[in-house]
Amino acid sequence: MEVKQTEEKCEENMRYYKEAYEQERQKRLILVNKLADAEGRVADLEQKLNRIKNSTFWKLSKPFRSMIHWMIRTKERVARYGNVKGIFRKLQAKQIEQRAKARYGTAGFPEPDEMKRQQETIFPKKIKFSILVPLYNTPEKFLTEAIDSVIAQTYGNWELCLADGSDGAHAYVETICKQYQEKDTRVRYRKLEKNGGISYNTNCALEMATGEYIGLFDHDDILHPTVLFEYMKAICEKDADYIYCDETTFHGNSINNMITLHFKPDFAIDNLRANNYICHFSVFARTLLEGTEVFRTCFDGSQDHDMILRLTAKAKRVVHVPKLLYYWRSHKESVASDINAKSYAIDAAKGAVADHLRSQGFEHFEITSTKAFETIFRIRYEILGIPKISIVIPNKDHYEDLKRCVTSIIDRSSYDNYEIIIVENGSKTQEIFQYYDQLRQNPKIRVLTYEDEFNYSRINNLGVSAAEGSYVVLLNNDTQVITLNWMEELLMYAQREDVGAVGAKLYYEDKTIQHAGVVIGLGAHRTAGHTHYRVSSNNLGYMGRLCYAQDVSAVTGACLMVKKEIYEKIGGLDEDFAVSLNDVDFCLRIREAGYLNVFTPFAELYHFESISRGLDDKGAKAERYNQESERFRKKWRNLLEMGDPYYNPNFSLDRSDFALKIQN
């Protein structure tokens, strides 16, 4: 009897799983067909567009179109701020940048008294820097300027290791190097039997090195005279074993002819995987090499990205010196000028990132170039299993907003294993309760009731406590899904053991950006603010940062995914922040617990911000916001004083567009 019951139970289970499998297969087949149809329509439209672009009329009308586009852009800027403020702010930012270029060029070099002070400084550690330079047919002017910039260093315990692979037609390279060597014994020179490329030549330079720290210097670039002094401070004060600084590209005969100023964040692993933002001037403890070579020849063209990924993974203390101390010369043969000058660098960079990801235990990932730049990458991580996701949506009235939000989730989400938990709080209208009754017919949707006074944190905590999923999405009722695989894009990061909260890219109705990551200390209240605020959806962002996933201090709770385990581990949202800053506080506590917070631009939604509860800029609401801001500043005083690690201190905290600080 028991055997028969067991067999019947097994058959019942088998039928259930077969039916579930068939349902899932059918759903996926429908999605595949929809995708195929969409791709077909895209192909048709591309053909039509190409025919238009190749027509004579299109070519002749280019001046007229350019004028129309300029008028549209101007109208958008004016509309964005209600007046000509947008244009004024753009012009102001340009002026600030021009002033900054003057400040960070030769005008920023130390005065004689400061030079003397640095030269006479005695550090608690005795460190020699070995600066490796691979030479190959280096133009005479570039070579002498590079060597002179090392000799001019205010910290004097260095050696310059020059490995020369130049051909016979450029014998002057050897002559110049030996002349410097005769004048200064810190200059070391080796003529190579052949030119083996950047990796080989640099590794040959390493064979000459006797220093405790290794620095990598291109043969056509220039160092700021205080860079080694600043790095020595980082070693002695912060025990740094990998160091980098901010940099600029320049052209012509002077470093004052700056093209792009690159002010970098502190160490951020997701940024680095997607984009070699560290680049120059990398200096590291020789012990990190563990007897290996600096560069691997199989990654020539992107050997520095490979090296940085390998060594920072081993480093105990990666330190960013937020000062512009490296000048990267742009000329027709340099990568600084055009990546196509060395097109093989694209494949090499993808290979370097792939090798790094495999070394960190990742499998079945995909690396593709983005519209920002060929070597700025989108990384798709494997999603493990099909975990259940609980979407928690607080709501009061606002039938149309909630319906738009829920409908978009149901109709536009490719991920199927989810539930929606709506937390009702004080609604009055009959239509919303009728809508709740309709929603209850869907087995994926539940409606909970919160009967106390409004407290956004408490409402979400109630919703999460009832969640069945192992992952939770906090979602505002005034959002609307754009990206079909938005849940997958968030989940691929939330699944990682080192990640806490993951946030999406959110737009206003006019497709300008509402959220692309949160910076602490930003804004008039000096609490937190959104970067790239009100920027067009077509904008690439500062140094391409709107085009790749990156580490941030916080993301908005309007769309935030986190493991339920982590949510509960850190105590959920702090109910002392009843309305505002609870999401930022939550993310900072996640950081305190040792996790990363990630913003991904590949999960996109509309966010019709604050239409549910109104803005906090008048009367009692403004007073409440001021009180919560003061509470936030007090709670996180130390972090605010240190500054956001993912936002360079050279940027203004009064603007969200990465404009530089105004300095007198």
Image (cartoon, rainbow, N blue to C red):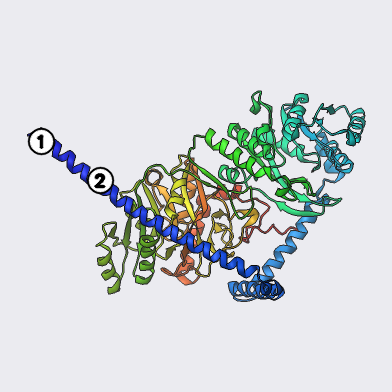
In this rendering, is residue 432 above or below 500? below
Q: Residues within 10 Å of mark 2 (few under 14, many from 20)?
A: few
Q: Where is residue 574 in the image (x, y as percent from the top left)?
A: 41, 52
Residue 18, disc: 2
Residue 449: image location, x then y, percent: 28, 61
Q: For residue 442, say whether it is visible.
A: yes
Foreground pick, 323 / 3: 3
Q: Where is residue 84 in the image (x, y as percent from the top left)?
A: 65, 75
The image quadrant that residue 162 belongs to is top right
Where is 219 relative to 510, above or below?
A: above
Image point (89%, 33%), residue name: 168
Three-letter code, disc 1: Lys
Residue farthest toward the left in the current orientation of the protein: 1
- What is the secondary structure assignment of the residue under circle 1? helix
Residue drawn at x 68%, y 37% as measured from the top left: 303
Q: Which of marks 2 and 1 is nearer the N terminus?
A: 1
Q: Residue 422 carries which label?
A: none
Q: Name the residue type under label 2.
A: Lys
Kindly identify which numbered label has been placed on residue 4. Answer: 1
Q: In this view, does 296 lie above or below 635?
A: above
Q: How far apart are marks 2 and 1 (CA)?
A: 21 Å
- Residue 513 x/y as whole percent: 55, 63
Image quarter hosting the N terminus: top left
